[in-house]
Amino acid sequence: MTPTAVDASIQRVARFGATERRLHTIHASAFVVMFLTGLVLYVPTLAQVFSNRPVVKGIHLVAAAAWLTALALVAVLGDRRALRRTRREIERFDADDLRWLRRRTPSPQGRLNAGQKVHAILQAALALLFTVSGTLLWLSERNTDLRLPGTIALHDWSMILAGVLVAGHVWIALSPDKLPALRGILRGTVPAGWAASHHPKWQAPPAGSAQRAPRAGPVRLVAAAVVVASGLLVTAAFTGLAFT
Ligand code: HEM
């Protein structure tokens, strides 16, 4: 790989585009709010400390509705081609990835290493489980036919699994060796030398060449307005129930 871009005095290469970074920020910040409020709803000692359960539950549900709305907005307005490319990249495990997973020996990795691919797949699966179990919990308060055995257990176990996964993710992200990657997910670029040593199979584009999201045309703007309106409606319904 021969990076060509010059950013200030050191060479940097573009690793994450704006849409990917936004998705990460939305997912991470909503997760923190839902995790903390979920913990208060789940742990009796915490529930006693924060005794106003309807407010905690209201925040949990508003965060859930805002999270799903924001994800849908990114899908409508963001760079979908870049997202599709990333999805394909995550789904493809080559021989080096499998070797990396089996023995964790230095097998050359692409833009995302095999561990990051597995992490992204688990996060997507957990997001689906949270959405299905959380929506069922919410609906079952209105319609007892939807009170299925195991829904709460599914929601709780998803939280425990997600908590362990995110703790491991943050632990690795904060290790000195990975700090350039942290800047990559926040600002988009990483040092070219770091990319070459950690992700040698990646043909890194020069910094400044990160794809911009296409401008939103009228159809996309109408779709975005529909998403926002539905999000507000769902939030209002969630909050109405939470505070009653
Ligand atoms: C679309 C996403 C989500 C929805 C719709 C949702 C919805 C709900 C609802 C309706 C409850 C029941 C509240 C009550 O009556 O006490 C609940 C509880 C809970 N939620 Fe979520 N939630 C979502 C995501 C999450 C996430 C991401 C986490 C953790 C990372 C989480 C953790 C919890 C926990 C631990 C409880 C307490 C369950 C119990 O009482 O055992 N939820 N959620």
Image (cartoon, rainbow, N blue to C red):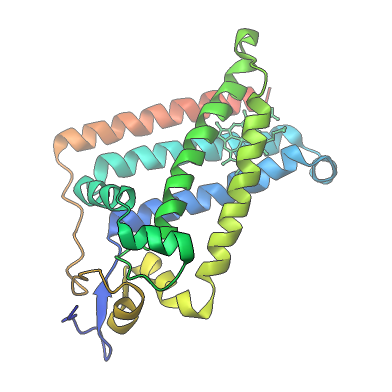
Residue 90 drawn at (x, y percent)? 33, 51
Question: 56 left or right of 67?
Answer: right
- Residue at the bottom extreme of this rendering: 9
The answer to which quarter of the image holds residue 114 is: bottom left
Q: Nearer the viewer, residue 135 or 219?
A: 135
Residue 162 in view, yes or no:
yes
Question: 105 left or right of 187?
Answer: right
Residue 65 drawn at (x, y percent)? 49, 34
Q: Residue at x 47, y 65 (%)?
A: 103
All told, the count of numbered labels is 0
Question: 143 left or right of 46?
Answer: left
Q: Nearer the viewer, residue 72 or 50?
A: 72
Q: Residue at x 50, y 53 (%)?
A: 28
Residue 38 drawn at (x, y percent)? 67, 41
Q: Residue at x 58, y 51 (%)?
A: 32
Query: On the rendering, which quadrant does ligand 1 occupy?
Result: top right
Quadrant of image for the N terminus: bottom left
Residue 10 drawn at (x, y percent)? 28, 88
Q: Residue at x 52, y 33 (%)?
A: 129
Quadrant of image for the C terminus: top right
The answer to which quarter of the image holds residue 193 is: bottom left
Is the residue 229 above or below the residue 159 in the image? above
Residue 59 in view, yes or no:
no
Q: Nearer the viewer, residue 14 or 7?
A: 14
Is the residue 134 above or below the residue 205 in the image? above
Q: Nearer the viewer, residue 131 or 215?
A: 131
Is the residue 16 above or below the residue 126 in the image? below
The answer to which quarter of the image holds residue 150 is: top right
- Residue at the top extreme of this rendering: 145
